[in-house]
């Protein structure tokens, strides 16, 4: 047989399914053995031999787990279990240009939910220095914004400070994740949707409410601050419901 013809008839074996299975098996082993952050895992060669697959399959599986922040390479220790960040993987996939309008809207809604819900933690942990920082941010904002079109830069600074005051590291990470999406309210046409109510609580009003450290009053003030955003979201949802 002509070896050239023989080679032409050979196709590369798809090992994707094998990698998937190896990845899931590794995760199951980690769980079954109750491995904790810092615990080492066997070497590639040992895993390949135990699973009966090639080192290439194991290497690809481990690379996936590294991408998911489940394992990491440590000098003098080899590969060890890592405590994954809740938002690292999410952040890598949040690319506004390729996310659907529905997904962007969901994340925008999540921001509204979180900011109203943070009131108790913000009021409990706020300090005089935090109040001073918020006042400094507001002093650099425009004096008047009757059209309710917040400047994105000022909006980010003020609300980022509130996330920081909450002291919740996961929430702070989530806020950094939201930065590329702050433009959604403007570029999607959301912000231009007409609203019935023009009166809202400004950033200055939020500071005054926060000074009292009354979580209920601050929560109500935040809800009023975001009222127009809620109305715009509801307006879009009503339009979608009518179409369906």
Image (spheres, grey):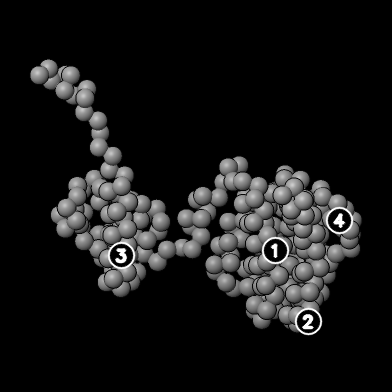
Q: Earlier in the sequence, mark 2 or mark 3?
A: 3
Q: Earlier in the sequence, mark 1 or mark 2?
A: 1
Per the image, label 4 sits on a secondary structure element best described as: loop
Q: Is residue 121 left or right of residue 91?
A: right
Label 2 to label 3, Cα distance in Å?
Answer: 50 Å
Distance from disc 1 to disc 2, alpha carbons, whole Å, reads 22 Å
Mark 1 or 2: in front is 1
Q: Disc 1 designates what residue?
A: 112
Whether residue 150 is visible: no
Q: Residue 28, how many percent across, how many down?
A: 30, 64
Left or right of 201 in this view: 20: left
Work out whether residue 93 or residue 16 is closer to the camera in this orientation and state it.
Answer: 16
x and y percent of residue 217 in the render? 79, 78
- Which of the two discs, 4 and 2, sits closer to the camera? 4
Q: Pointers 1 and 4 in contact (CB under 8 A)?
A: no
Badge 1, how many Cα within 10 Å: few under 14, some, many 20+? Answer: some
Q: Which residue is mark 4?
A: 195
């Amino acid at each position: 047989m002509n070896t050239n013809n023989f080679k032409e008839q050979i196709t590369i074996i798809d090992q994707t399914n094998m990698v998937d299975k190896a990845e899931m098996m590794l995760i199951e082993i980690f769980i079954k053995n109750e491995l904790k952050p810092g615990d080492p895992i066997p070497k590639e060669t040992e895993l390949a031999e135990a699973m009966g697959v090639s080192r290439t399959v194991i290497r690809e599986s481990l690379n996936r787990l590294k991408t998911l922040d489940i394992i990491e390479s440590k000098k003098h220790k080899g590969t060890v279990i890592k405590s994954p960040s809740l938002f690292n993987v999410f952040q890598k996939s949040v690319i506004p240009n390729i996310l659907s309008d529905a997904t962007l809207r969901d994340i925008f809604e999540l921001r509204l939910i979180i900011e109203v819900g943070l009131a108790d933690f913000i009021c409990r942990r706020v300090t005089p220095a935090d109040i001073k920082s918020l006042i400094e941010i507001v002093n650099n904002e425009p004096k008047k914004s009757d059209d309710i079109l917040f400047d994105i830069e000022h909006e980010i600074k003020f609300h980022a400070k509130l996330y920081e005051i909450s002291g919740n590291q996961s929430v702070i990470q989530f806020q950094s994740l939201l930065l590329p999406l702050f433009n959604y309210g403007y570029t999607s046409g959301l912000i231009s949707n007409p609203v019935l109510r023009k009166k809202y609580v400004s950033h200055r009003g939020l500071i005054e409410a926060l000074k009292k450290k009354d979580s209920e009053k601050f929560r109500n003030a935040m809800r009023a601050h975001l009222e127009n955003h809620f109305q715009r979201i509801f307006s879009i949802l009503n339009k979608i419901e009518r179409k369906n």
